[in-house]
Amino acid sequence: MASENIRADVINVVDRYIAVSLVKELNKDAGWRSEHMLGRMADYLGQLPHSQGGGNSNGAMIHQLSMMFAEPDDPHTKWACAAMDLLKLKSERNHDALFGYVLLRNRPDPLVEGSECHTAAAIGRAVEMSRSALYKNLAAAEEFLIKLIDMYEMGGLLKAA
């Protein structure tokens, strides 16, 4: 199954979900990145302040929060995440197959020297499915999301009426 066989609006839903998932994953580490001496020296123009005992925990946390990524907040992305969450409730294997396929389909496989992109077999291994199981789960996931997308679009038409 080539990516062009999956509807573009389904790919869009999954891409939005991946974007939010990546932001959440990156933000998990907030607070664990430490301030380094070189950075402090640059901040204070080489004149480090004297320690006042308690450290600068408030300043350090504010610094960490400033490094967090903002999650996409538009209604369509929120809907896409809810749709993918529903898919996961319906079938975790459908969810994982579609998520893995959209994430890896156009990315080089680091395990294969000179590869253009992941093969269906490689994606199947990544999501712990045979190639045929991957195709079966992709088809079921796409069918489910198409129904949700159609309902979403129908809701927009009803609001306009």
Image (cartoon, grey):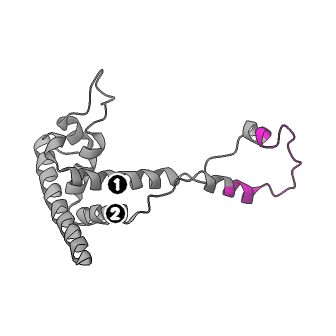
Q: Nearer the viewer, residue 45 or 108?
A: 45
Q: Is residue 33 left or right of residue 51?
A: left
- Is residue 60 on the magenta stretch? yes
Q: Position of residue 74 (x, y in %)?
A: 41, 63
Q: Residue at x 27, y 41 (%)?
A: 126
Task: Give yes or no for contact between labels 2 and 1 (Cβ–Cβ under 8 Å).
Answer: yes
User: What stretch of residues is rendered in magenta?
Assistant: 41-62
Disc 2 secondary structure class = helix
User: Residue 39, position in %: x, y?
Assistant: 73, 39
Closer-to-camera residue (8/137): 8
Q: Quadrant of residue 146?
A: bottom left
Q: Residue at x 31, y 61 (%)?
A: 80
Q: Is residue 37 above or below residue 75?
A: above
Q: Quadrant of residue 109?
A: top left
Instruction: Report the disc number at residue 76.
Output: 2
Q: Residue at x 33, y 29 (%)?
A: 110
Q: Which residue is mark 1?
A: 16
The N terminus lies in which quarter of the figure?
A: top left
Q: Amino acid at mark 1?
A: Arg
